[in-house]
Image: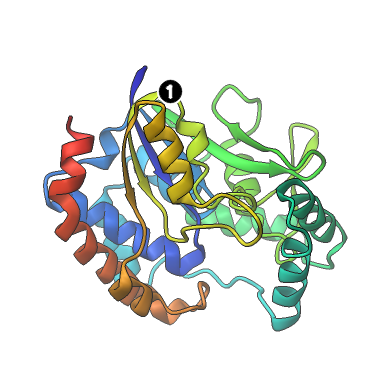
Amino acid sequence: MADTALVLGGGGPVGGAWLAGVLAGLTDSGVDPARADVVIGSSAGAVFGTRLLSGVSARELYERQLSGADAVRLPVTAGRTARYLWAALGSRDPQRSTARLARAALRARTGPEADVLSTVGVLLDGRHDWPARELRIAAVDTLTGQVEAFDSHSGVTLLEAVAASCAVPVVWPPVQAAGRRWMDGGSRSTANLQLARGYRRVLAVVPLPRAVGPHPSAAQQAAELSADGAGVALLTPDRAARRAMGRNMVDDARRPAAARAGHAQATALAAAVAEVWNG
């Protein structure tokens, strides 16, 4: 078994703020998530994972949420939300649900792909090179409906990989990479903990416990890893954090409160996380 994997899940701007707070809270308490042998990111988690491995400290990620930096204006409307839910919830079969969502993503009238690339490019602070340490970025193939992970050997740029992972169906267009079109890495699983299989210790920070539709939750995936012999620490928002985050994951005004709630939650759980993460 390989050693440590840090899994960062999706959750929009507000979920990302909570995630940044958790990373900072753990770091301030003596638990260093950034020392992971591999970082696996989906959607917002892909952005924060990239920045963490590119040398941005957990403290800086946190303070940027408090200051109002990193503001993202996702073009979410009531109509687009309804179309997303109709597609994702239209079948009880996970594969069919994902296929419906992929078709909706491909047919939706959205802005150009350049909008996704430019927005994600700003969030990455113009970073174009894959980090020296191992980073895996999850995205869903719109043709097969399967989750795949990009890395530095995949033949795609870092920007393409992260943009593909952030391409929320119906809101943003699927992103072209490696000759295929990709949508949000959190479409089937907000965490994609299955990508950490084979690692001895796994720390998962997951803003949304499960994806919309008939898909396994982060807790179910964590239990499967535990059954395989891994030590798993799974953090999802507690009651106070959920209250701070609210229900609208693109409400920019919620980000400072969400970040503070994540920091407080991580501080309270740091000792328990350390038992798994520090071995």
**Residue 200 appears at what percent x and percent y?**
32, 25
Residue shown at the point (83%, 65%) measured from the top left: 108
Whether residue 73 sits left or right of residue 30 in the image: it is right
Q: Please count the marks in the image.
A: 1
For the N terminus, the image quarter is top left
Q: Looking at the image, is 127 positioned above or below residue 259? A: above
Give the quadrant of residue 160: top right
Q: Looking at the image, is 122 positioned above or below residue 148? A: below
Residue shown at the point (62%, 62%) measured from the top left: 212
- Decide if residue 258 is in sight here: yes
Query: How are the residues colored?
Result: rainbow
Residue shown at the point (36%, 58%) measured from the top left: 236
Give the quadrant of residue 239: bottom left
Whether residue 172 sits left or right of residue 104 in the image: it is left
- Decide if residue 125 is in sight here: no
The residue carrying mark 1 is: 198
Q: Looking at the image, is 79 positioned above or below residue 157? A: below
Q: Residue furthest right?
A: 107
Residue shown at the point (33%, 64%) measured from the top left: 64
**Residue 101 appears at what percent x and percent y?**
77, 57
**Residue 84 appears at what percent x and percent y?**
73, 68
Whether residue 119 sits left or right of residue 53 in the image: it is right
Element class at badge 1: loop
**Residue 148 appears at what percent x and percent y?**
64, 34
Residue type of the residue flagged with mark 1: Gly
Whether residue 129 sits left or right of residue 199 in the image: it is right
Give the quadrant of residue 265: bottom left
Density class for disc 1 (Cα within 10 Å; few <14, some 14-19, many ≥20) is some
Residue nearest the viewer, comparing 74 with 269: 269
For the C terminus, the image quarter is top left
